[in-house]
Image (spheres, grey):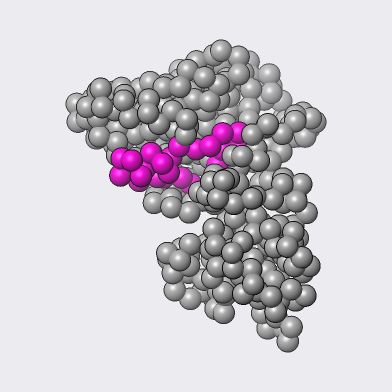
Amino acid sequence: MIATELNHTKCKSYLLASESEGKALMIDPVRERLDRYLAVLAYHRLHLELIIDTHTHADHRTGAFELSELTGAPVAMHRQAPAPHVAVHLQDGQWLSIGDLRLQVLHTPGHTPDSISLHVGGRVFTGDVLLIHGTGRADFAGGDPGAQYDAITQKLFVLPDETLVFPAHDYRGHTQSTIGEEKRGNPRIANHSRDEYIGIMNHLGLPLPDSIQEALQPNQSALDADSMKFPTYAQLSQVRQVSPAEVSARLTAPDSPLLLDVREPDEFRGDLGHIAGARLIPLRELPERTAELAEFKNRDIIVICRAGARSTTAAALLTGMGFERVGNMKGGMLDWNDARLPVER
């Protein structure tokens, strides 16, 4: 097996390959290093079979979608990932095969809801959930330090102590650790109770990443910042969140809201379906098509997407354009389907 880190920077990207069969997997590619990845694949005569992002990154642009366009390899993420154009949605416990390599997907939320780790051949690639002598922050939207503690202690720390740990970031010059070392000496979580860990994480007081405005919403939407003026992080935090149950109850009221679905057309008609009566305007088209919503300027609008991220962006955009009664369906069509509410396809 070929297993190597390709960036040699704070952001880590990993290449795994079945050398005997010439098939490869890329984990967490960074947009600025695509030329390097293509050169390494060509040098080793490897065919890229799959690209996996371990979570929705907030501090750098993912290279997953551009790398997919260049190589034809599909992008895989956890089912709760908000981005469109994810060809393979992964589940906890799922097994993947790349040539003679077998990988197990572990859903390890807490840093983000869609965070996963990948266990393969005595190694575990932990994304930003478990770092070397640290853990990923849990204060972004959807972060949950309690869920993170559970994921680390119940999914990762049950692996053999000798399992090598490879995170998606490192800020101190480390390259790898082991599960045993992190269990015994990780200062954030070793020898701490769940409540103690939650207290530690809730009082870190970390500043937002400098690049969050340029990275998070483009990664969630697969749109470039130069193609759309995204709302600020503060504007996103002010969007009113409405549960699927509340949305369902509102649909039978005389003053029912407009349901605005901002996914791509293939998603609207895809596995998750759409809510009857919803109007489709993809997020990428919304700034140019707001005139179509003029009659709803002073009426209720509830915006919908796959997981509630793109629709929060859309709701903030509409609010900034003077639409005063806009809400977001929290959890999107994923939560709507999980609640077994009716859909059309």
In magenta, the rendered stretch is 56-78
Q: Residue at x 33, y 40 (%)?
A: 70
Q: Is residue 77 above or below residue 273?
A: above
In which image quadrant can residue 33 be found? top left
Q: Residue at x 30, y 44 (%)?
A: 72
Q: Residue at x 39, y 51 (%)?
A: 87
Horizontal arrangement in the rendering, residue 281 relative to residue 293 (left or right): left
Residue nearest the observer in this picture, 167 or 294: 294
Q: Is residue 295 above or below residue 62?
A: below
Point out the image quarter for the C terminus.
Answer: bottom left
Q: Is residue 161 above or below residue 48?
A: above
In which image quadrant can residue 35 be found? top left
Horizontal arrangement in the rendering, residue 257 relative to residue 171 (left or right): right
**Where is residue 151 shown, x and y percent of the image?**
58, 37
Q: Is residue 73 magenta?
A: yes
Q: Is residue 221 magenta?
A: no
Kindly tell me whether residue 248 is visible in this rendering. Answer: no
Q: Residue at x 33, y 30 (%)?
A: 38
Point out the image quarter for the N terminus.
Answer: top left
